[in-house]
Image: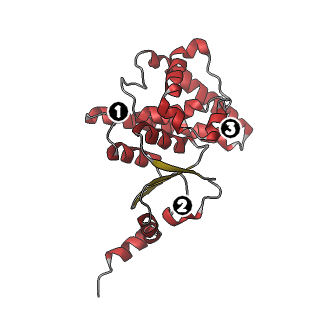
Amino acid sequence: MQAMEPLVVLNNLFFLKGNSMSATARRSSMTFFSDPSSHYSHRVRIVLAEKGVTVEVKDCNPDSVPQEVTDLNPYNNLPTLVDRDLCLYGDPKIMMEYLDERFPHPPLLPVYPVNRAECRLFIDRIERDWCPLVDKIVAKQDADAIALARKQLSEGLIAIAPIFADRPYFMSDEYSLVDCVLVPILWRLNDLGIELPADQCKPMLEYMDRMFARDAFQESLSEVERDMRD
């Protein structure tokens, strides 16, 4: 029996891989399909801005993604990053680490394996402990669940506020991907209905002011996100 061609196997495994390859082959530059209100898309936009990457950012409605995304991404979701013949989708961390390796300056992950592992662990903790709470508040489906999520998120942030007195960035002397994940959440606190007490959170509030003032952060903001702090 004749063996299957590799391309056929890939098509069977990855569904729309063939369409994705043909669609990306027509591109000569980087394109980022972004949800302008999502903190998951925002973190990737921050990395792009920090790296000074020339990229076309296309704001999309997550409930009605354009055909371009459908052709490229078998899950038909946001964010989606296209770099010439490469299409990345699903977990934003994949995009962030790809960008850090593709554009190594300035580095956003430490050089040493132990420190890199710690950064990834901090990101994992944020995604496990806080991102679900943010998503629950944003969903606006159950008033009691939203109130509880606000309380838990507020208490979690207040608990870690003192650590920002020790170092300029999150558990680090250097700006990293951890900050790129955390800062979009902090930027949204007003919009999420959360106000941190100044007396308990002074180091964190000062950290927020420094991060929000970064040129790359300001460049990363969508119009929707700018309105969140007005």
Observer-nearest residue: 75 or 65?
65
Quadrant hosting residue 116: top left
Distance, label 3 to label 2, CA atoms, is 32 Å
Q: Which residue is the site of mark 2?
A: 69
Q: Residues within 10 Å of mark 1 (few under 14, many from 20)?
A: some
Q: Disc 3 residue type?
A: Ala
Amino acid, disc 2: Val
Q: Mark 2 or mark 3, which is nearer the start of the sequence?
A: 2
Q: Is residue 199 above or below residue 10?
A: above
Dot 1 or dot 3: first in sequence order is 1
Q: Amino acid at mark 1?
A: Glu
Q: Secondary structure at mark 3?
A: helix
Nearer-the-camera pick, 131 or 96: 96
Q: Secondary structure at mark 1?
A: helix
Residue that mark 3 sits on: 145
Look at the picture and state if 96 lies above or below 15. above
Q: CA separation, marks 1 and 3?
A: 31 Å
Furthest residue in direction left, as rendered: 112
* Pointer 3 with pointer 2, Cβ within 8 A: no
Q: Residue furthest bottom?
A: 1
Q: Quadrant of residue 192?
A: top right
Residue 37 position, x and y percent, is 61, 43
Q: Position of residue 81 (x, y in %)?
A: 46, 53
- On screen, residue 208 versus residue 137, left or right, reads left
**What kind of element bears circle 2?**
helix
Q: Which residue is mark 1?
A: 118
Q: Residue at x 54, y 63 (%)?
A: 68
Residue sitting at x 41%, y 16% = 166
Q: Residue furthest right?
A: 143
